Amino acid sequence: MKIQKFDVLIAVYICCIAITELMGAKTVPLFAIGSLHLTASVALLAVPLIFTANDVIVEVYGKARARSVVYSGLLTIALVLAMSFLATWLPPSPRFAASEPAYDAVFHASIRIAAASLTAFALAELLDVWVFSKIRERLGKQALWFRNNVSNFAAQFVDTTVFMLLAFYGLGRPFGTNISFLVGLILPYWLLKSCMSVIETPLVYLGVQWLRNGSSRKEQA
C-alpha cells in the first residue's frame, strides 16, 4: 500500500486543525509577571505545524494550491462547527441522558472555539500565503528560513489576537479584567508560537525536500 506524500501532509494539516478545534478551549498556566498571569492554549503544540505545512505547500506547489488547502481547512472548521450545533441540539437517548450536560458543556465551548477559529484561521492563513509569496517574489528561492518565519510571525499574531478575542472575551466581565486576561493569553501564546516557528524551521526544509523528491508535480511559481 502506497500513500502519496501530499496526502500525508494534508492528513497532518487537517489533524492539527481538528486538535485546535476540539482541544483548544483548555488553557494552561505558564508563569506570572506581577499580577499578569501568562497562560496558553493546549493548541499551541499543533498551530505552528499548520503554518509550517502551509509554507511547504507554497514553496513546492505555489500559492494557488496553498490557498486551495486553506479553503479546505476552512471547510473542515465549518463542518466541525455545524456538527457541534447539530450534536448538541439533538435530544439524548435515555441511556445517555445523564451525560448530556457534560457533553453539551464541552461541545458548546467547541462551537465558540470553532467560530473564533474559523475567522482567525481565514485571516491568518491567507495572510501567511500572501506574505510568504510576496517575499518570495522579491528574494526568489533564497532564504527560505526568512520567508517562513516572517510570514509566520505576522500571520500568527493575527491568528492569536483574533482567536483569543473571539474565543475568550468574557461578555459578563469588566473590560479591564478582559483586557488583562487577553493580554496574558495573546502575548505569551504569540511569542511561544513564534519561538516554535523558529525551532520548526528545519521541518520546512525537510518538508520541502521530502515533498519534492519523487513528486509527480512540478514546482509552480
Image (cartoon, rainbow, N blue to C red):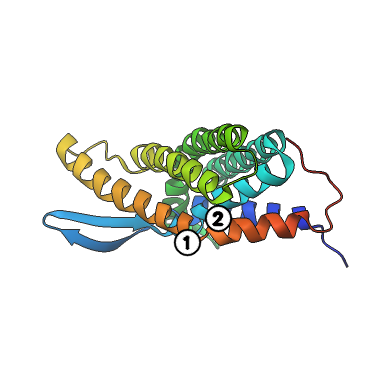
Q: Residue at x 65, y 61 (%)?
A: 206
Image quadrant containing the C terminus: top right
The residue that label 1 is drawn on is 199
**Mark 1, residues whose alpha carbon is within 10 Å: few (<14), some, or many (≥20)?**
few
Residue under the image location 53 percent in, 34 percent down: 131
* Disc on res. 215: none
Viewer-proximal residue among 196 and 111: 196
Q: Is residue 40 visible?
A: yes
Alpha carbons under labels 2 and 1: distance apart: 11 Å
Residue 30 lies left or right of residue 75; in this view the side is left
Q: Which residue is mark 2?
A: 49
Q: Quadrant of residue 82?
A: top right
Q: Earlier in the sequence, mark 2 or mark 1?
A: 2
At label 1, the amino acid type is: Ile
Estimate the x, y position of residue 28 in percent, counting from the top left.
Answer: 32, 62
Q: Amino acid at mark 2?
A: Leu
Where 212 sits versus 86, above or below?
below
Instruction: Name the residue at 50% across, 33% down.
Output: 123
Name above or below for residue 62 compared with residue 43: above
**Above or below — where is 121 with respect to 91?**
above
Q: Quadrant of the image for the N terminus?
A: bottom right
Q: Position of residue 49 (x, y in %)?
A: 55, 55
